[in-house]
Image: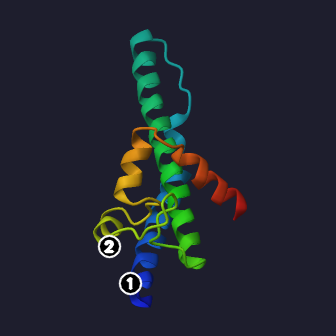
Amino acid sequence: MSKSELERYKTVLEARQAELSGALRNREDIAIEKTPDALDEVQLAGERELAIRNLDRDSNMLRQVRAALGRIADRTYGVCLHCEEDISVKRLNAVPQTPYCIKCQEAADRHEFEANESVDDLLAAA
């Protein structure tokens, strides 16, 4: 992968990191609110659950983005963490934080190997 391509991916990932970091600072939606009406409490609980799920999703995405930036720094970006083959440019353009080629991602989605384990190991080593 050329230096200009790496810089382009780095710019995209840094912008995504800033966006996600800002979104994670807004935690007002998960505050527990009390109301005298039971139906309102149920609705607020549902909205709070949705906000928590969104925060969790954004937090996981931020970890993936930071891991991808780490791979750029150590010059392993664009190489599948499972099979060590190059990840296609088309896939990197679609999902720049991806740690896996499409075949390994499909295998991970089918739970044929523990996908999160290798990413967490890399994050712990960083």
Where is 78 relative to 61, above or below? below
> Which image quarter holds the C terminus?
bottom right
Q: Where's residue 104, x and y in %? A: 41, 53
Q: Where's residue 72, x and y in %? A: 53, 76
Q: Tell which circle, 1 or 2, labels the residue nearer the N-terminal end.
A: 1
Quadrant of the rendered image containing residue 8:
bottom left
Q: Where's residue 116, x and y in %? A: 55, 47
Q: Is residue 110 visible?
A: yes
**Residue type pointed to by label 2:** Val
Give whichever of 17, 36 is nearer the camera. Answer: 17
The residue that disc 2 covers is 89
Q: Is residue 118 left or right of residue 44?
A: right
Question: Residue shown at 49%/73% (left/top)?
Answer: 77
Q: Is residue 115 left or right of residue 90?
A: right
**Residue type pointed to by label 1:** Glu
For the residue labelled by badge 1, is the local secondary structure a helix, a strand or a loop?
helix
Question: Residue shown at 64%/59% (left/top)?
Answer: 122
Residue that lies at the very extreme toward the right in this rendered image: 125
Question: Residue shown at 50%/36% (left/top)?
Answer: 52
- Does the residue at mark 1 contact the one at mark 2 (Cβ under 8 Å)? yes
Give whichever of 43, 10 is nearer the camera. Answer: 10
Q: How is the image coloured?
A: rainbow
Q: Is residue 26 visible?
A: no
The residue that disc 1 covers is 5
Question: Residue shown at 32%/73% (left/top)?
Answer: 89
